């Protein structure tokens, strides 16, 4: 159940009495959506408030249709960075909301109540978002958090929790340094079990480390970079061989590693000229349609004071027409997606500078480096977050949402053409500094929901987490960037949902003879047919999207899927994918006397 809307205007507020005096109004202090610091009502509970500030703190919504869910916001002690995630932690279909706050990780239901088994202590401080995926191969997802000591970041741990809040066997893992930003989950070896990839800081050294779901190190890692780490990694195939690479940043350089820890030819990419990297995690996207992803990343200059967006090819060379320069430093990861609806990917990013007045902008280019119409914005306050690319108002077009970074507390919303989204900004308590929002349909009602929050960055004492109902139809096929780094694994891979690409997973991968395996189609594109082949399976073929297959005989078996859009097809084969074990028969105990001598 959601809250009833409190619809505001400057002259009339439903259920609230305003006594106007020029640009100020008198209201009851209990009518405030939150109580700002240093507010003292008169002895009868009244306060004098300006009209502008009243518009921020009285309303439960900023435009007709946006409502705060009942039970929200929730207030916790501590700060949070890089936002939260949505995931399903229980048996009901509704999603839960998970954030790292202070030295704990919290999980709430859609009504704002705490999920049983949560929160959990983290001992140290996370400086990124949690991640969600199956890392131990039990066919159930886990929550992964990385931490570091504040200030130096010299020590850290990785925590892995089951859905009920219990600790996964083998964790926490003590790192060789503090974890930098958000952990990334990706399947490196093709076994459908996700590995955990983090950058570790042990000043002045920086490492890329990979851990398996039992807490052990993945072969070939960690590997050392040329200096301290700069951000979280991205993981995806950039060479076109269907095997992922790891793209990582040090302060000075961008590295690309194969799954064995070897640096790809042409790397590291080092821009030089006092250009360095911080916090702007790389994004991987195929910009030119050649089937191989490029690396998109933002930097900042220690001498010129500006920022640049680089696009790097898989051989370490620069993509034609780039880099593009912006007025100030770049801290947020790039946002890549088809923003103007022309079928080609575009790139959006904001810059940031410590300033007493608005001095930053959001910039949007097409893949050739030309500005989209209506961009960049006029001068605004700093942007530190990755910009969300979602259909927030149900018009089947992309909108852009980002942070504000002032003490006022708000998220800004813009249409794809650079105009301000009607009724925005979206107010929160405290500052949205480094607080990425996310968009999902958390209660499965077909309506878009959004979560975000504010942190008391001045005193570091409180964090307010919100859940809103946007009141607009949910369009997941348009929401190309609904959460930090595209998905709750945070792998940084932009996937064009219209491009035909075969993919699948199966559960379980190891069975006894006469066992069944459930296959789940993960292919993209406008698919009209699925053609499965199951070596050793019964049936041996299927045209169902998600078939259930019986395996009667021991062995290791290949699985092939061909998907078609009616004109083109795409094929994937996973070799020795299903492992069927012989089920030994245990002989019965011979009959005999019951007497024990």
Image: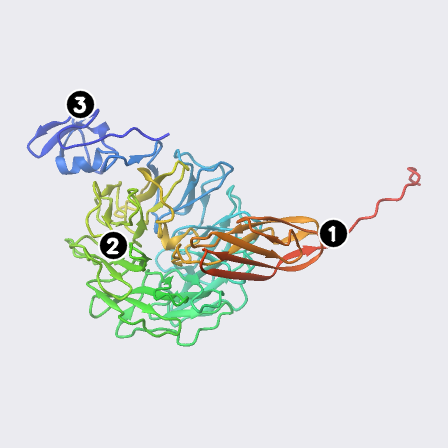
Q: Where the C terminus falls, by quadrant?
A: top right
Q: Measured from the top left, where is residue 113 in percent x and y? A: 41, 34
Give the number of the disc on residue 583.
1
Depth-wise, is mark 2 or mark 1 nearer the camera? 1
Give the number of the disc on residue 13.
none
Secondary structure under badge 3? loop
Q: Are marks 1 and 3 in contact (CB under 8 Å)?
A: no
Closer to the camera, 63 or 569?
Answer: 569
Instruction: Quadrant for residue 280, please give it.
Output: bottom left
Q: How many marks?
A: 3
Q: Distance of mark 2 from mark 1, alpha carbons?
A: 59 Å
Q: Measured from the top left, where is residue 350 in percent x and y? A: 25, 57
Query: Going 21% across and 36% down the picture, which residue do you hit?
Result: 57
N-terminal-most mark, 1 or 3: 3
Q: Disc 2 designates what residue?
A: 383
Question: Is residue 209 placed above or below 514 in the rendered structure?
Answer: below
Q: Disc 3 designates what residue?
A: 44
Secondary structure under badge 1? loop
Question: Is residue 5 placed above or below 167 in the rendered structure?
Answer: above
Q: Distance of mark 2 from mark 3, alpha carbons?
A: 41 Å
Q: Distance of mark 1 from mark 3, alpha carbons?
A: 78 Å
Question: Is residue 115 placed above or below 187 in the rendered structure?
Answer: above
Q: Measured from the top left, where is residue 507 in percent x and y? A: 58, 50
Query: Going 48% across and 69% down the picture, which residue do you hit?
Result: 258
Image side of residue 177 versus residue 461, left or right? right
Image side of residue 245 versus residue 38, left or right? right
């Amino acid at each position: 159940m959601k809250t009833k809307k409190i619809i505001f205007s400057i002259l009339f507020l439903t259920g609230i009495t305003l006594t106007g005096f020029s640009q100020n109004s008198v209201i009851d202090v209990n009518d405030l959506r939150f109580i700002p610091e240093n507010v003292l009502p008169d002895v009868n509970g009244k306060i004098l408030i300006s009209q502008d500030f009243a518009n921020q703190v009285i309303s439960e919504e900023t435009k007709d249709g946006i409502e705060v869910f009942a039970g929200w916001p929730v207030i916790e002690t501590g700060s949070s960075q890089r936002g939260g995630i949505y995931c399903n932690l229980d048996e009901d279909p509704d999603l839960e909301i998970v954030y790292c706050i202070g030295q704990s990780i919290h999980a709430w239901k859609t009504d704002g109540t705490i999920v049983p088994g949560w929160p959990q202590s983290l001992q140290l401080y996370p400086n990124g978002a949690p991640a969600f995926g199956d890392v131990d191969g039990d066919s159930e997802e886990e929550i992964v958090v990385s931490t570091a000591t504040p200030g130096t970041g010299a020590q850290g741990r990785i925590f892995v929790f089951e859905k009920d809040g219990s600790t996964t066997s083998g964790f926490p893992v003590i790192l060789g340094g503090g974890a930098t930003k958000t952990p990334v989950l990706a399947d490196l070896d093709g076994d459908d079990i996700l590995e955990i990839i983090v950058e570790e800081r042990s000043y002045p050294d920086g490492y890329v480390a990979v851990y398996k779901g039992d807490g052990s190190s993945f072969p070939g890692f960690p590997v050392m970079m040329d200096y301290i780490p700069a951000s979280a990694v991205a993981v995806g195939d950039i060479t076109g061989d269907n095997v992922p690479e790891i793209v990582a940043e040090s302060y000075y350089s961008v590295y690309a590693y194969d799954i064995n820890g070897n640096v790809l030819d042409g790397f590291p990419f080092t821009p030089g000229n006092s250009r360095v990297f911080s916090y702007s995690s790389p994004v991987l996207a195929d910009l030119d349609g050649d089937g191989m992803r490029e690396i998109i990343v933002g930097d900042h200059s220690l001498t010129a004071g500006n920022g640049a967006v680089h696009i790097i090819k898989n051989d370490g060379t620069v993509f034609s027409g780039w880099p593009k320069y912006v007025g100030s430093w770049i801290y947020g990861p790039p946002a890549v997606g088809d923003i103007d609806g022309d079928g080609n990917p575009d790139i959006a990013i904001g810059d940031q500078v410590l300033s007493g007045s608005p001095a930053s902008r959001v910039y949007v280019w097409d893949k050739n480096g030309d500005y989209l119409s209506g961009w960049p914005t006029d001068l605004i306050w700093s942007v530190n977050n990755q910009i969300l690319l979602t259909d927030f108002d149900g018009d089947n077009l992309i909108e852009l949402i980002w942070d504000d970074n002032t003490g006022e507390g708000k998220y800004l919303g813009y249409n794809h053409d650079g105009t301000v989204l009607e009724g925005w900004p979206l107010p929160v308590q405290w500052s949205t500094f480094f607080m990425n929002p996310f968009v999902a349909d958390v209660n499965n009602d077909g309506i878009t929901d959004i979560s975000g929050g504010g942190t008391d960055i001045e005193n570091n004492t409180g964090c307010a987490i919100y859940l809103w109902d946007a009141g607009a139809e949910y369009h997941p096929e348009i929401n190309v960037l609904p959460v930090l780094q595209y998905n709750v694994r945070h792998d940084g891979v932009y996937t064009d949902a219209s491009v035909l690409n075969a993919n699948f997973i199966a559960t379980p991968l190891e069975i006894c003879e006469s066992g069944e395996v459930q296959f789940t189609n993960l292919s993209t594109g406008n698919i009209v047919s699925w053609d499965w082949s199951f070596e050793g399976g019964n049936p041996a073929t299927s045209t169902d999207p998600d078939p259930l297959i019986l395996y009667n005989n021991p062995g290791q078996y290949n699985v092939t899927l061909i998907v078609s859009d009616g004109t083109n097809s795409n094929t994937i084969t996973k070799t020795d994918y299903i492992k069927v074990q012989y089920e030994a028969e245990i002989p019965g105990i011979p009959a005999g006397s019951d007497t024990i001598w």
